[in-house]
Image (spheres, helix red, strand yellow):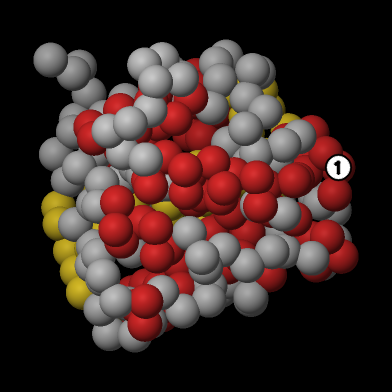
Amino acid sequence: MANFPTETALHHFDGADGARMAWHGMGPEDGRPVILIHGLFSNAFTNWVRYGHAAKLAAKGRRVIMPDLRAHGDSAKPHDPSGYSEDILADDNLALIEQLGLAPGGYDLGGYSLGGRTTARMLVRGAKPGKALLAGMGLEGLLDLGGRVAFFRKVLEGVGTHPKFSPEWMAEGFLKTTGGDARALLLLLDNFPKIARASLADLAMPILVLTGSEDNDNGSARALAAALPNAGFVEVPGNHMSAVTLPQLGDAIADWF
């Protein structure tokens, strides 16, 4: 049994196209909001609650707001391509900020892996958090996702056929633990627009780049920190999958926010 709180309150909001989306809340309702966005194949509970990261922020008096991305968790999982317009993940979460009435500078924002990429898209699109967090993300993962998208497409199109212990088999195993919808996720993969390197230089707010010491899945986190004008860089133990399960990740997030 976990020695930290895991109970969250489920809320809903309207996605950018009106789809029914979900977010999970923890911590005092009058606390400073921090929005945390999970990674691909994951969900809010797995990324932020299961291993105690959200509880550490809540213990500091923060209001932790954890959306389930489209095609994940308790949020809509359309099986129609029209439900996946370009940049829909950023659009959905910008809609969340608007519907919660969060003022520029009055909240913080971050994410892990695809959540970090979504955070970066939101920042270049005009989101104005006080601080931001890009975790489990490197420079190449923002500039060009081609190789990663091809890998995940192979995983989803070959469910049930991957050799045991192969990277694809491991990714499929994670997908099964989170109840992922392969059909919806395949549609989502077509809608990850690139980020222009020059646009990163315009992000003036403090940003922490946080990575596992053995994580190269999305390219170089050090290079990402160097490309940002006001960034810190922190390494914690682990690779892309294991770092999120370790307390050091939550400690670093709580120290930052």
Residue positioned 66% across, 52% down in the render:
146
Side of 5 relative to 87 (left or right) = left
Q: State the residue in front, 79 or 120.
A: 79
Residue positioned 36% across, 16% down in the render:
164
Q: State the residue in front, 59 or 189.
A: 189
Side of 228 relative to 152 (left or right) = right
Question: With respect to residue 188, does 1 lie above or below?
Answer: above
Residue 234 spot, x, y in % from top left = 68, 28
Residue positioned 55% across, 16% down in the render:
238
Residue 233 spot, x, y in % from top left = 73, 33
Q: Can you see residue 58?
A: no
Q: Secondary structure at mark 1?
A: helix
Q: Which quadrant does the N terminus fall into? A: top left
The amino acid type of the residue labelled 1 equals Ala
Residue positioned 37% across, 45% down in the render:
156
Please tell me in which quadrant of the rendered image residue 223 appears.
top right
Mark 1 packing: few (<14 Cα in 10 Å), some, or many (20+)? some
The residue to which callout 1 is attached is 226
Residue 53 spot, x, y in % from top left = 37, 32
Question: With respect to residue 204, does 252 lie above or below?
Answer: above
Residue 45 spot, x, y in % from top left = 26, 40
All told, the count of numbered labels is 1
Question: With respect to residue 196, does 146 lie above or below?
Answer: above
Q: Can you see residue 173?
A: yes
